[in-house]
C-alpha cells in the first residue's frame, strides 16, 4: 500500500503488516533450519542412525582402519623384504662381496646408492599413503553429504515435540 495508516490496537502501521504477510513462511523456516558449521562437523562424529544404514562414525572408523592397515602392510613389506633385497643386490653388484673395495669404495658403491633408494622408496610410500588417506576422506565426505541430504528430507522434532513425546501419561 502507498499510504500508511496507524493501527490503533498495537501501534503498528499497515505497511509493516503487509511486509510481514508478504514474506513467505518457507524462507523463515529455511533460515531456522540452516545448520551451523559446527553441527555439520559434529554430525559425522555422533552415532546417529539414519534410514540409509550404518552411522557415519562407523564408516569413518572403517575407512581409516583400512587405510592404516594398508599403510602398515606397505611399510612392513618394504622394510622387511624390499630394502634388504636391494641392499643385497647392491652389495653383490658393487664387488664388495669379494672384498676388493676399500671403505670409501664400499660407501660410494654400496651404502650411498642404498640410502638413495631407501629415500626414494620412503617418498613414494608417503605419496601413496597420502593418496589413500585422501581417498578415504573423500569417501567419508560423500557419506556425510548423503546423510545430510537424508536429514533435510526428514525433519527433526522440535524441543516441544520431544518434551511432549517423552512425558509420561497420567491415568
Image (cartoon, grey):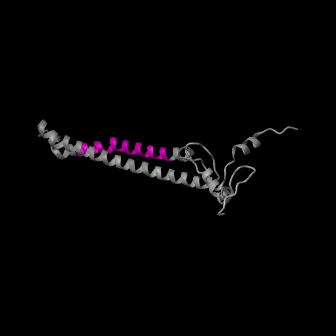
Q: In front here: 40 or 4?
A: 4
Q: Residue shown at 60%/49% (left/top)?
A: 54
Tell me: 15 left or right of 114. Answer: right
Q: Position of residue 42 (x, y in %)?
A: 55, 43
Tell me: 66 left or right of 24. Answer: left
Q: Residue shown at 37%/43% (left/top)?
A: 75
Q: In front here: 117 or 83?
A: 117
Q: Position of residue 98 (x, y in %)?
A: 15, 41
Above or below, comparing residue 104 to residue 148 in the picture: above
Q: Is residue 76 magenta?
A: yes
Question: Magenta stretch mostly in which secondary structure?
Answer: helix
Which range of residues does the magenta coloring cover? 63-89
Residue 98 seen in the figure: no
Q: Residue shown at 50%/51% (left/top)?
A: 141
Q: In front here: 8 or 67?
A: 8
Residue lying at the far bottom in this picture: please name it.
Answer: 2
Q: Position of residue 121 (x, y in %)?
A: 30, 47
Residue 36 seen in the figure: yes
Q: How many marks?
A: 0
Q: In front here: 74 or 106?
A: 74
Q: Is residue 115 magenta?
A: no
Residue lying at the far top in this picture: please name it.
Answer: 103
Q: On the rendered image, what quadrant is the N terminus found in?
A: bottom right
Tell me: 27 left or right of 106. Answer: right
Q: Position of residue 144 (x, y in %)?
A: 54, 51
Q: On the rendered image, what quadrant is the C terminus found in?
A: top right
Amino acid at each position: 500500500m502507498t499510504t500508511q495508516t496507524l493501527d490503533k490496537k498495537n501501534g503498528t502501521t499497515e505497511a509493516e503488516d503487509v511486509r510481514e504477510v508478504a514474506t513467505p513462511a518457507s524462507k523463515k523456516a529455511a533460515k531456522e533450519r540452516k545448520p551451523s558449521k559446527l553441527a555439520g562437523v559434529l554430525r559425522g562424529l555422533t552415532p546417529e542412525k539414519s534410514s540409509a544404514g550404518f552411522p557415519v562414525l562407523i564408516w569413518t572408523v572403517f575407512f581409516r582402519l583400512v587405510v592404516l592397515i594398508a599403510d602398515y602392510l606397505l611399510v612392513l613389506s618394504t622394510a622387511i623384504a624390499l630394502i634388504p633385497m636391494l641392499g643385497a643386490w647392491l652389495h653383490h653388484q658393487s664387488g664388495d662381496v669379494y672384498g676388493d673395495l676399500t671403505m670409501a669404495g664400499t660407501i660410494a658403491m654400496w651404502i650411498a646408492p642404498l640410502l638413495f633408494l631407501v629415500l626414494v622408496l620412503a617418498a613414494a610410500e608417503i605419496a601413496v599413503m597420502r593418496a589413500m588417506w585422501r581417498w578415504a576422506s573423500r569417501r567419508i565426505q560423500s557419506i556425510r553429504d548423503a546423510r545430510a541430504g537424508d536429514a533435510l528430507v526428514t525433519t527433526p522434532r522440535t524441543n516441544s515435540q520431544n518434551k511432549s513425546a517423552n512425558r509420561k501419561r497420567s491415568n
